[in-house]
Amino acid sequence: MPLPDLLLYLGNRRATGYLVIEREGLNKKIELQDGSVINASSNQPREYLGQILINLGHLTEDQFTKAFETQKQTRVFLGKILAMIGLVSQEVVLDALNLKFRETVLEALHWPDGVFAFDPTPLRPSIDGLSIQIDLIDIHREGEFREAAWQAIRAVFPHGQIHLELLESELPSPPKPETIEARLISLIREGATIDEMALALHATDFFLYQRLYALHRLGAIRTHLEPPKVAPAQVQPIAANQTAPQLIRQAQMWMEAGNLGGAEVLARKAHEMFHTPETWQLLQSSEAALTHQLRKELMEGNQVPALTIHSSKLKTLDLTATDKYLLSRIDGVREVTAIVRVSPLHELEALKSFQRFVASGLVKLSRRQAQ
């Protein structure tokens, strides 16, 4: 059943319960009350409330880190903490939650496949008294608009590794300082790719591409199309005649031998090839084991990363958007934990990058002395 049809069905039936949708390690949980979304959670970092508030300019990365520490100690909802300590108003939190809930649902409409389950169980009370209701029928209508918008956007920006040229004379007016538009214009001037902009701005894809498309329609930006780079293989190619049980055994052997990085890459490729419950369980296990190992290696002991070369030389290196984002956050003060926690990346993705930085000698780690 296509997801847009499912939303329309649940909305028209004024359904109450939990809708869970999953795909390739991505999962979202949407709580419905009488056909309206009252809560939506996701394991995609750019859909977290803190990331959205950073993107909108209501919160800095350092403020988010401090608020997150308070949340860990108190178990109070992040939005409530931010309002209580005066960093953002409750009105701003509610607006950000509204955006978060919509983005969590709408982003999934572009999944080419996936699974869903609906549990018609009565719901718990709203989050800490912050009440939001968004009609599923309205979200369905917005999804139809986005589908048409994405077709136009992708015709101009087919992938995220595009560089843009700014035509300042075509801007209707200079952007106001400290706004999203000002930060976006600055990144275009610096020669950032679209993928790099998304990370730097902590932006969801549609939020960013919609703004770039508006600038394109004004004639204020010009695209320089280049074929997207292909990431180099991290393990030896898998033979076409290998079966799922053979790959599972090989990955399990690597895990037992302590080669967790290789096991995770092999498990991911096996699941991409076969999509079986066994390969999915293997991928989950290998990711969990590798995450645990990298946390101990990179995050325990208040470890602070520092560049071994001057930051100006980074431009000469062949780096991915993820690499550039993480390296730009290294200032000799922030700990690895703080950088990973506030980044709009999955934790394992960020930790694997840091492991590679250290192994290549690009970054060194030192333990902060306890005070």
Image: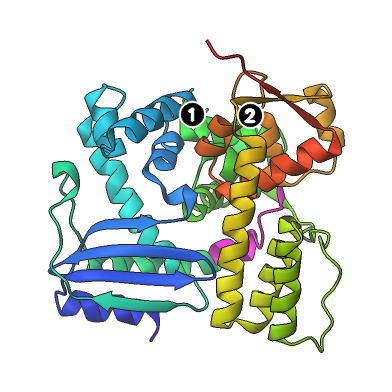
* Residue 129, placed above or below residue 248: above
**Residue lying furthest front in this view?**
256
Task: Report the residue marked by disc 1.
Answer: 61
Q: Is residue 185 left or right of residue 39?
A: right
Which dot marks residue 135? none
Q: Nearer the viewer, residue 197 or 19?
A: 19
- How far apart marks 2 and 1 lie (CA) works out to 10 Å
Task: Report the residue marked by disc 2.
Answer: 329
Badge 1 crowding class, 10 Å Cα cut-off, few under 14, some 14 to 19, many 20 or more, is some
Q: Amino acid at mark 2?
A: Arg
Q: Nearer the viewer, residue 335 or 179?
A: 335
* Residue 244, placed above or below residue 328: below
Residue in the image at 56% along x and 33% along y: 337
At numbered mark 2, what does the secondary structure look like: helix, strand or loop? Answer: loop
At numbered mark 1, what does the secondary structure look like: helix, strand or loop? Answer: helix
Q: Is residue 209 left or right of residue 133?
A: right
Badge 2 crowding class, 10 Å Cα cut-off, few under 14, some 14 to 19, many 20 or more, is some
- The mark nearer the N terminus, 2 or 1, is 1
> Where, quadrant-wise, is the N terminus in this rendering?
bottom left
Residue in the image at 29% along x and 71% along y: 19
Q: Is residue 156 magenta?
A: yes
* Residue 59, placed above or below residue 38: above
* Residue 320, placed above or below residue 117: above
The percent coordinates of residue 367 (x first, y second) are 66, 21
Which residues fall within the magenta stretch? Answer: 152-165
